Image: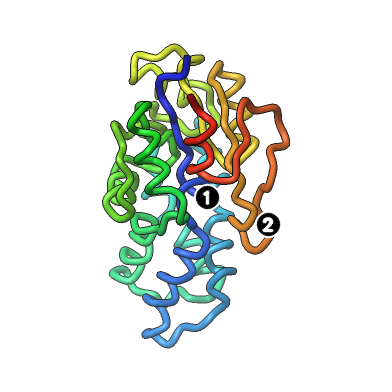
Amino acid sequence: MVKALLFDVFGTLVDWRGSIARQSRHILSPLGIETDWEAFADAWRAQYQPSMEDVRNGRLPFSKLDVLHRRNLDVVLKDLGLERVDEATRVRLNLAWHHLDAWPDVPLGLALLRARYRVAPCSNGNISIMADLARHNGFPWDAILGAELARDYKPKPYVYVASAAAFDCAPEEAMMVAAHSSDLAAAAAAGLRTAFIARPDERGKGKGESRASVPVDISVASVLELNGKLP
């Protein structure tokens, strides 16, 4: 029996691409900077996995995602010839990850699920990001779990196991919910149940995953549909 639902957040619950594009435009356009804002968001996100891999491989000590995001932002601004962007503006830009907008189905879907299950993020985002996203979108978390608790980054097995254990759950009593097949494959290998949520437009129109490429326990189109599929 599943007792807890653990959610990936970036892409699964929130629209990181559209949100980062909008906020970056809002912050940088008044400075006379114009660019393809969706491409800017994509370039920033493209640094995400490589920066975490340095931590996973032990080349860097564990650092919060806020720290990695800021390092990655500096790389992107340099690549775009925008070194003139000042420190205060860089701080504001980095905080954009704390204010991403949820997909429309998410707030009500999570509230309905929480009536029957413990719910928490199992994200690579640090605790302050997850807390601010919850306040921004009305996410009803029972706890904030994931990378900062485990001091490592998904898809390392301990991140999933530690998140389940925080709720006194054996791995098979927790279900990982994500829009990314690689995340679910890693969770399943660690012993968790899995649910796939399609987000076909996560990376732009038709550029997200519309179906899982790995075996999963449940596959749905929204958090609301997941509520209807679970007992």
Instruction: Work out whether residue 65 can be spotted.
Output: yes
Instruction: Work out whether residue 59 can be spotted.
Output: no
Which element is circle 1 on? loop
Q: Horizontal and vertical percent for residue 209?
A: 66, 47
Residue at the image position 34 percent from the left and 55 percent from the top: 98
Amino acid tagged 1? Gly
Front one among 79 and 64: 64
Is 159 on the left-hand or right-hand side of 45?
left
Q: Horizontal and vertical percent for residue 1?
A: 47, 14
Inter-mark Cα distance, 2 to 1: 12 Å
Looking at this view, name the residue that lies furthest to the right: 213
Circles 2 and 1: CB atoms closer than 8 Å: no
Which element is circle 2 on? loop
Q: Horizontal and vertical percent for residue 3?
A: 41, 19
Mark 1 — residue?
11
Which mark is on residue 207? 2
Residue at the image position 48 percent from the left and 24 percent from the top: 231
Amino acid tagged 2? Lys
Q: Horizontal and vertical percent for residue 85?
A: 39, 75
* Snapshot colouring: rainbow
Say if 193 sits above or below 77 in the image. above
Q: Of label 2 and label 1, which has the lower sequence position?
A: 1
Q: Residues within 10 Å of mark 2 (few under 14, many from 20)?
A: few
Front one among 111 and 185: 111
Which mark is on residue 46? none
Front one among 166 and 66: 166
